[in-house]
Image (tube, helix red, strand yellow):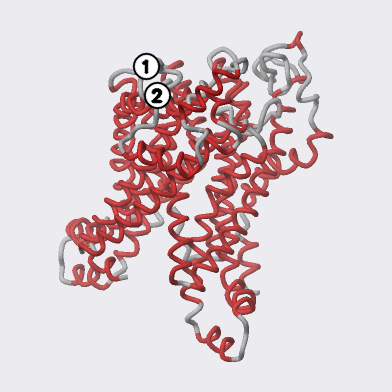
């Protein structure tokens, strides 16, 4: 309990504020606060520059090739960045934690088997796997979630396993076992509470990874299918016009960068507070 | 030692086996590969003859064994997009371009990250340390494709220092290599710094200082040599993320390596080439990690017994 005020005292205000403005508020309220329909093409207002660069207040961040409002598209895109990272990370964390607990607790053959599978998922180039899947089944929301789970579950499994291996030898676990607690009960009541901090920190640190992954997939055209304005897709759309109409790529790209930067800063402070031992690359 | 190598080799082969199963299943996952190979208006006769030619009328395990047999000698069939070439030949032809770019990226990351990590550990808490921290944070937050576009925009288009894209000598390679190396620099700097901090805190380093060994010798001879093992283990991971990075960066800079090839092959539905690229990448990654493991065990004998 003594830790809370200290953390609050050093609460990283800036990253939280940036995250709220760029990601969370647009994601929740895009329908109300976006100035325009993100899909509506104002053909007469094609390639409008942003405000302060010769543009007007009607299209604050300018418009794209079809005259669609960049700001509104970024706001609607935020929703997909948020949903994909939350759903993907929660599912990936659950899969990784359960398998990590099993591996660390059972040890032996089961452990070896699960860890080999982790090695294999790390060995398969995730982007290529996504590409191959997209080639046979076409890009889809489910595919992106699947790739996210595939990429991150191994990190959780490895870390949880390592900590479970140590915890299961501790006295309080041995005592619980002598007292007749079942394996499931030991895992739930004695081991899981001791690693939950690590899981939370790891999950926060993975948000940045996942947002970059999602943006990269949609940049390559294999993420969430068109016409949904995913951030990576918006960057790809303006890539060829970066010289003449830089704002089309610049603002979505900056939204990605600011989001990931803030999430990573937040993750670092959270780690220092909850789990200083965790050394993350 | 031999036993250790043997165990690791077995692990690698098991991983490779499972990957072949995955790659094989990919083409059967959502319907028959015939759909991907033939145009939509193909006649029933064409379909039948291709089915027989590819052996798709045989049971799955037979098909898989044939696939495995061919894969073992690097045969993934003929490319459907680059006619007249085997898929493996197409990949091999593009491999040097990727290796060149990847090699330069590794070189840049090591040359920048190791001194940055060591110095920020020595000057812990200084302005230098904080700057290095900011660089590392930026590195982990910048998506490679966005950094690539920004670099191209500033240094190629606006300043005209480098060509914007395409294949060529060193001047063509610098920007993509930096885009690829950026994330690695961040990771490697953080790792080196924390490893250095740990070693600088040990008894033998303190003893060396007490004995009056000069500071430079303490840092580079006593501390760094022992800390270096941590960044070395990272090279396995590095190999993997460079391959992934090559897909993105090669697309941005139109660099004709295997990454761009994979994207082209998928857009052209050239499945044999996609399969070969995935297999090549997986083998490369596993081999790199195997070598790192062995190297690690040679340098630090304790690893073998744990």
Quick check: A72 above or below B136? above
Q: Name the quadrant of the C terminus of chain B.
A: bottom left
Query: In the structure shown, which secondary structural element does the residue marked by tag 1 occupy?
Result: loop
Nearest to N terminus: mark 1 or mark 2? 2
Quick check: A250 above or below B103? above
Circles 1, 2 touching at the beta carbon (< 8 Å)? yes
The residue wearing badge 2 is B78
Instruction: Please state which of residues B208 and A154 is positioned toward the viewer in this rendering.
Output: A154
Numbered circle sitting on residue B158: none
- Mark 1 is surrounded, within 10 Å at the Cα level, by few (under 14), some (14 to 19) or many (20 or more) other residues, namely few
The residue wearing badge 1 is B84
Q: Is residue B295 left or right of residue A113?
A: left
Image point 72% across, 44% down: which residue?
Answer: A24
Instruction: Please state which of residues B184 and B120 is positioned toward the viewer in this rendering.
Output: B184
Q: Position of residue A90 (x, y in %)?
A: 65, 54
Disc 1 to disc 2, C-alpha distance: 7 Å
Quick check: B151 above or below B84? below
Q: Position of residue B27 (x, y in %)?
A: 52, 35
């Amino acid at each position: 309990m003594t830790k809370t005020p200290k953390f609050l005292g050093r609460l990283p205000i800036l990253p939280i504020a940036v995250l709220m403005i760029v990601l969370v508020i647009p994601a929740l309220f895009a329908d109300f606060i976006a100035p325009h329909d993100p899909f509506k093409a104002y053909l007469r207002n094609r390639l409008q520059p942003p405000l302060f660069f010769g543009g007007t207040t009607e299209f604050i961040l300018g418009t794209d090739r079809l005259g669609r409002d960049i700001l509104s598209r970024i706001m609607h895109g935020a929703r997909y960045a948020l949903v994909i990272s939350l759903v993907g990370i929660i599912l990936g964390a659950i899969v990784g934690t359960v398998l990590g607990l099993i591996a660390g607790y059972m040890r032996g053959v089961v452990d070896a088997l699960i860890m080999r599978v982790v090695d294999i998922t790390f060995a398969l180039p995730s982007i290529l796997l996504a590409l191959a899947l997209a080639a046979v089944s076409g890009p889809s929301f489910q595919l992106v979630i699947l790739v996210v789970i595939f990429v991150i579950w191994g990190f959780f499994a490895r870390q949880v396993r390592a900590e479970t291996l140590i915890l299961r030898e501790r006295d309080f676990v041995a005592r619980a076992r002598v007292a007749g607690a079942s394996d499931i009960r030991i895992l739930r009541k004695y081991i899981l509470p001791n690693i939950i901090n690590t899981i939370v920190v790891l999950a926060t640190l993975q948000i940045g990874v996942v947002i970059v992954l999602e943006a990269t997939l949609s940049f390559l055209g294999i993420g969430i299918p068109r016409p949904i304005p995913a951030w990576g897709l918006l960057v790809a759309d303006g890539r060829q016009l970066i010289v003449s109409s830089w704002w089309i790529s610049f603002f979505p790209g900056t939204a990605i960068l600011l989001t990931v930067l803030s999430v990573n800063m937040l993750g670092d402070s959270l780690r220092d507070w909850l789990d200083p031992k965790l050394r993350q690359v | 030692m031999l036993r250790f190598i043997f165990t690791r080799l077995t692990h690698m082969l098991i991983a490779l086996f499972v990957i072949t199963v995955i790659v094989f299943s990919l083409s059967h996952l959502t319907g028959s590969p015939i759909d991907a190979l033939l145009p939509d208006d193909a006649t029933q006769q064409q379909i039948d003859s291709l089915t027989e030619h590819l052996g798709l009328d045989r049971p799955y395990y037979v098909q898989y064994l044939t696939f495995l047999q061919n894969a073992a000698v690097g045969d993934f069939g003929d490319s459907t997009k680059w006619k007249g070439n085997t898929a493996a030949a197409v990949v091999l032809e593009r491999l040097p371009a990727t290796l060149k770019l990847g090699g330069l990226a590794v070189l840049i990351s090591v040359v920048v990250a190791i001194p940055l990590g060591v110095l920020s550990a020595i000057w812990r808490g200084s302005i230098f340390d904080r700057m290095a921290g900011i660089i590392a944070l930026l590195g982990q937050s910048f998506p490679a494709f966005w950094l690539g576009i920004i670099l191209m925009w500033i240094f190629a288009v606006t300043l005209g220092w480098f060509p914007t894209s395409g294949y060529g000598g060193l001047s063509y390679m610098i920007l993509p290599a930096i885009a690829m190396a950026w994330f690695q620099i961040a990771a490697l700097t953080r790792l080196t710094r924390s490893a250095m901090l740990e070693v600088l805190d040990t008894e033998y380093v303190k003893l060396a200082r007490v004995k009056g060994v000069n500071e430079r010798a303490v840092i580079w001879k006593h501390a760094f040599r022992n800390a270096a093992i941590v960044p070395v283990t990272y090279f396995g991971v590095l190999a993997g993320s460079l391959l992934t990075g090559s897909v993105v960066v090669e697309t941005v800079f139109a660099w004709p390596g295997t990454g761009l090839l994979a994207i082209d092959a998928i857009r052209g539905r050239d499945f044999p080439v996609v399969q070969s690229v995935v297999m090549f990448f997986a083998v490369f990654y596993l081999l790199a990690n195997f070598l790192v493991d062995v190297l690690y065990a040679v340098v630090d004998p304790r690893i073998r017994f744990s």
